[in-house]
Amino acid sequence: MRIRDTVKRIDYYIMICTLVLFFIGTVFVFSATKSLDSNLKYIIIQLSAMFIGIVIMYLITLMDYDDMSLFWKFIAGGCIFLLLLVLVIGQGKETTGTKGWIRFGPVGIQPAEFVKIGFVITLSKHLDCIGDGINDIRNILMLILHLAVPVFLILLQPDFGTAMVFVFIFVVMVFVAGINWKYILCAIGAASVLSVIAWNFLLNTIQKQRFYAFLYPEIAPTTYGYHVLQSKIAIGSGGFSGKGIFKGIQTQLGILPEKHTDFIFAVIGEEGGFILSVIVVALLLALIIRTVIIGKNARNFEGSCICIGIAAMWFFHVLENIGMTIGLMPVTGIPLPFVSYGGSSVLTNFIALGLVQNVYMRKKSITFF
């Protein structure tokens, strides 16, 4: 398929939303890193990831997603291998308490980001194979195993925030697939028990402090409550129209932490104000809603599952990232799709976009009687 033919067949609504979001994100990443040494490298990495992502997105549209899913065993095996590899040679920062990066000199990748896409593809194939038998207890147990393996390996890093992304994707996809409510209620009960176990045996001190910061940030304004308080100050000080690009006090003086990655929305709130913040949220919601619509019009159930899984991934990222910047969610290392800085995140989101476009280009045809 020629590039011109592909361009004619893609969904322009979702593409425009994506590119506008990426443009806004890149502008504010540049503003957030202006006070840092060699700040141009952040923009170079961000733009490079975008161009590579667009190329991969195009390549993904060339293969029918049904044919792609035939390799689900290899995809699943590759995902498990990456998660095991990061446990052996993974690196990270002591400040985050998580070692989830594999580095090759100056270049680093975050395997869990790419595994999200593999998880959506393999779970879609799994649900498609099960079909109407989703409420059979044996199939339920196999679905739980499908979720448990990547979540367990990610928790060993430990990365509780990313693990919750997988759980949310799973819950949404099996719910759409028609799982019985009794299993959902059982899952809620099991999650309650597991949360106690996770708190006592899996979460480290830094991760526990993030929950304390969510509940009582004012108690420790200079330690674990610092991120949330400074983020809320930045967003609040932006007012209706913002202070202007490069003019945010919290941003430019380096008071706001992780300003180009996890807290990029706080930078937008301070320098772009309420107006631009609403525009960003509206674009993100439009992206998610359009993905759901594409899934609804997919030619088969597997295509619908792929779109629903990706929409769920984006929705959780948006909910968690924006929620933590305004103190409504615990602080985790969850980037804002297409807006936050990060090569792995940008690549993952463009790959996800490629899958959505793949489903759209092969949507069911309308028959007129």
Image (cartoon, grey):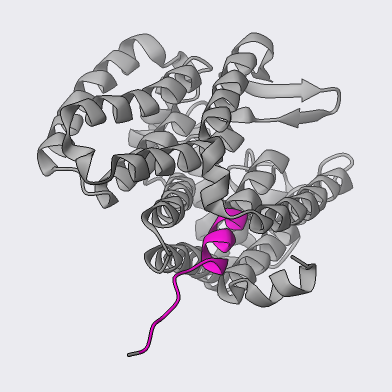
Q: Is residue 204 visible?
A: yes
In the foreground, 198 or 218 = 198
Q: Which residue: 41% across, 63% down?
A: 292
Percent of width and height locating residue 109: 71, 31
Percent of width and height locating residue 87: 59, 13
In the foreground, 236 or 65 = 65
Q: Using the image, determine if residue 50 lies above or below residue 167.
A: below
Percent of width and height locating residue 320: 43, 45
Residue 182 placement, left or right of 12: left
Residue 208 placement, left or right of 176: right
Of the 4 image quadrants, the one containing the C terminus is bottom left
In the foreground, 178 or 151 = 178
Q: Using the image, determine if residue 217 lies above or below residue 55.
A: above
Residue 117 placement, left or right of 123: right
Of the 4 image quadrants, the one containing the N terminus is bottom right
Q: Is residue 99 visible?
A: no
Residue 355 highlighted magenta (yes or no): yes
Q: Which residue: 78% across, 50% down?
A: 52
Q: Which residue: 52% across, 35% down?
A: 72
Residue segment shown in magenta: 353-368
- Residue 218, by quadrant, is top left
Q: Which residue: 37% across, 23% down?
A: 148
The single residue placed furthest to the left in the displayed view is 182
Q: Using the image, determine if residue 186 lies above or below residue 243.
A: above
Q: How many marks?
A: 0
Percent of width and height locating residue 16: 63, 72
Residue 162 highlighted magenta (yes or no): no
